[in-house]
Amino acid sequence: ICYFPGCRKKVHLIKSQCRFCARIFCMTHGSPIFHEECNDGECAKLQKLKIEKKKQETIKDIDRTQYNQKNNIQTLKPGQRKEIAKKLREKIETGQHNRVQKSVRNKSQNTDQKNKTKDKKKIPKRRK
C-alpha cells in the first residue's frame, strides 16, 4: 500500500521508493515533491537542494569550458597528464645533472687557477 496519506493503491508490482526517506509510494506519489506532506516537506527540500547543487556544478563546468575556449587553453586527457609530468621530471633531472657537472668543472678550474697563481708567487725573481 502506498505510504502517501489517503492513497490506498497497492504497490506490490509497480512501486517507487523515495531516495531521501526510503518509503515506498505508488507511481503518482513517488516523486519527493508530491509526497512532501508526509515528512513536513523534508524530501522536497532535499531534492531541491540536490537539484540546485547539480545546477551550480553544471554552471561551473560551462564557465570553465568557456574560459578555456576563450583563452585557448586545452584540457588534458587522463593519460596526457602522466606523460607531461614524466617529461617534466626528466627535464628537471637532466638540468640538475648538468648544473652539478658545471659546478664541479668550475671548482676544478678555480683550483687550477689558484694553484698557478701560487706557483708564480713561489718562484723568486733573480736580480742582476
Image (cartoon, rainbow, N blue to C red):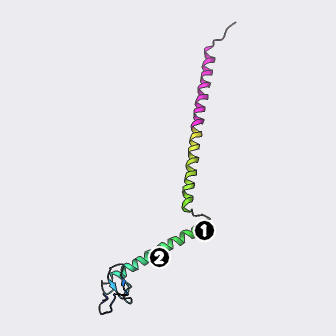
Name the quadrant containing residue 31: bottom left
Relative image position of residue 17 (x, y in whole percent): 35, 82
Name the quadrant containing residue 118: top right
Which mark is first along the chain, 1 or 2? 2
Q: Is residue 2 above or below residue 73?
A: below
Is the residue under label 1 in contact with that under label 2 (CB below 8 Å)? no
| Residue at left offset 60%, top offset 14% | 122
- Disc 2 is placed on an element classified as helix
Name the quadrant containing residue 110: top right
Disc number for residue 55: 2
106 within the magenta span: yes
- Disc 1 is placed on an element classified as helix
**Residue most toward the top?**
128
Residue that label 1 marks? 69
In front here: 48 or 11? 11
| Residue at left offset 60%, top offset 21% | 115
Q: Which residues are magenta?
A: 100-126
Disc number for residue 2: none
The quadrant of the rendering that contains the C terminus is top right
Left or right of 12: which side holds 114?
Answer: right
- Classified by dominant secondary structure, the portion drawn in magenta counts as helix
The type of residue carrying mark 2 is: Lys
Relative image position of residue 78 (x, y in whole percent): 54, 61
Q: Is residue 123 above or below residue 19?
A: above
The type of residue carrying mark 1 is: Gln
Relative image position of residue 6 (x, y in whole percent): 30, 93
